[in-house]
Amino acid sequence: MQIVAYLYSDPLLETAPDPDIWGLEVDRVYQDLGQRYQLQNLLADSEAQPPDYVLIRRLEELGDNLEEVNGAIAFLEALDIEIIATEQNYTSSNLKNADSDRFRAELIQLLPEIQQNHRRDRLRLGHARNRIKALPPPGKACYGYRRGQDKYILDRSTAPVVKAFFEHYLLYGSLRGSVRFLEKKFGKKISVTTGQRWLTNPVYRGDLAYKNGDIIQNTHIPIISRPEAAQIDRLLRRNRRLPPRTASAARSLAGLVSCQKCQSGMTITCTKARGKKTEYLYLRPIACPQQPRCNSLAYAEVLEATITRICEDLPLAVNEIGSPNLSAIKSNFEQKIKQREQILSQVTTLETDGILDTETADLRRYKLRLEISQLRDRVAQLPPDSLQAIAKTVALPQFWLDLSETERRFYFREFIKQIEIVRELEFWQVQLIFIF
């Protein structure tokens, strides 16, 4: 008994499957990538020496259209070869028993599915060819852009609106606040969910994102720069650690303070004396299980203690994390980027010399651009090289005192993960937990 198998895949749509996927011993595997040269060899070999079985995954792999599929099936079945489609309900295993009518009915039932799969693959193949040429994906351009001939171009009427949204978010770190700002200044109403998508959308960074998750960088003019994009990513990661609705809170300590004794977060309350305009701010535990409950603390006193503690502890904490050589890591990534850029420049020469055909060259260029984008993204996620210099600046008490509450909130959350109130009898002190 002789068993052969046939595999077809298009490198633009999927990676080549493993020839040993059949779960049983196969005498020979014919495998095609993009073109069906091996299928012609299979048909010629079968005519010369017919095997007992031909295994395939799906019938549509036997041709680009129904006519080719029917022709290949009829040719093999005429040689009394039993065809088994492992991923479809089709087998011609009883053709030798003159039961061909039933199996022909099974094939007729599969024809709409085969035709639909061919139509889907042609659509996907067209999208894939556009993708390897770094052309925009199908659909309407993102707000702030319009479609050009082969790339996105800035829409001069809407791009300033998007730019203002990003600038406001970078300044205040509040998504809801930026959404409200957009409506107030430009009359542009968007939901918070839409604002979230804007902040993470690669298109605004000058990149193209495709449905398969691939991102190609520097394909069109960006609305935000790379440093701004990296800052937005840090703000988003930072805000995810905070309690809900504290990212846009007016007070700089909102969402950061907790009581070490009762393990409860602390919220900010405001009181006024009757008949007076003076406000008194306090930090009190939200859900203290202690009896008696942990006392509230004056907001101004906790703020002053926090500033004192960050000026003393931050330089020490930055020095302790100085073990990894960030410059060397960054240099290593940049060297890999440079190597791939050199290979990318050589692909055009190989195509001109006829060593690579156009389709192969486009695919190779696409994969290199994808690798370069991934390496650049890893570089952007590295901490800034100037972290120690920044720590020296923010370790000055006057730096914090000159800031507004909104600005102070921004910088606190850049460095502090949690502020713990450590209580000892009638006294308390502040303990900081940094994000690094």
Image (tube, rainbow, N blue to C red):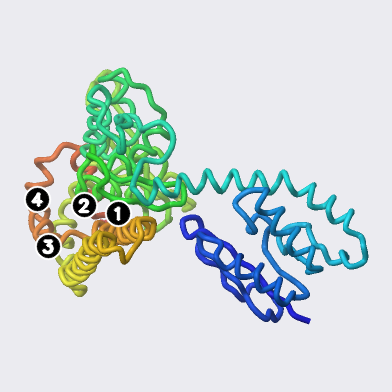
Residue identified by numbered label 1? 419
Q: How many neighbours does mark 1 have within 10 angstroms: few (below 14), some (14-19), or many (20 or more)? A: many
Q: How many neighbours does mark 4 have within 10 angstroms: few (below 14), some (14-19), or many (20 or more)? A: some
The answer to whether residue 125 is left or right of residue 275 is right
Measure the alpha-carbon separation of dots 4 and 1: 18 Å
The answer to whether residue 335 is left or right of residue 289 is left
The answer to whether residue 12 is left or right of residue 326 is right
Is residue 434 visible in the rendered image? The answer is: no
Residue identified by numbered label 2? 306
Query: CB atoms at circles 1 and 2 under 8 Å apart?
Result: yes
Residue identified by numbered label 4? 397
Of discs 4 and 3, which sits in the foreground? 3
The kind of residue on which mark 2 rests is Thr
Q: Secondary structure at mark 4?
A: helix
The kind of residue on which mark 3 rests is Gln
Image point (70%, 75%), residue name: 48
Residue 247: assigned label = none
The kind of residue on which mark 1 rests is Ile
Task: Say which quarter of the image contains residue 323.
Answer: bottom left
* Residue 257 drawn at (x, y percent): 33, 49
Image point (65%, 53%), residue name: 68
Residue identified by numbered label 3? 388
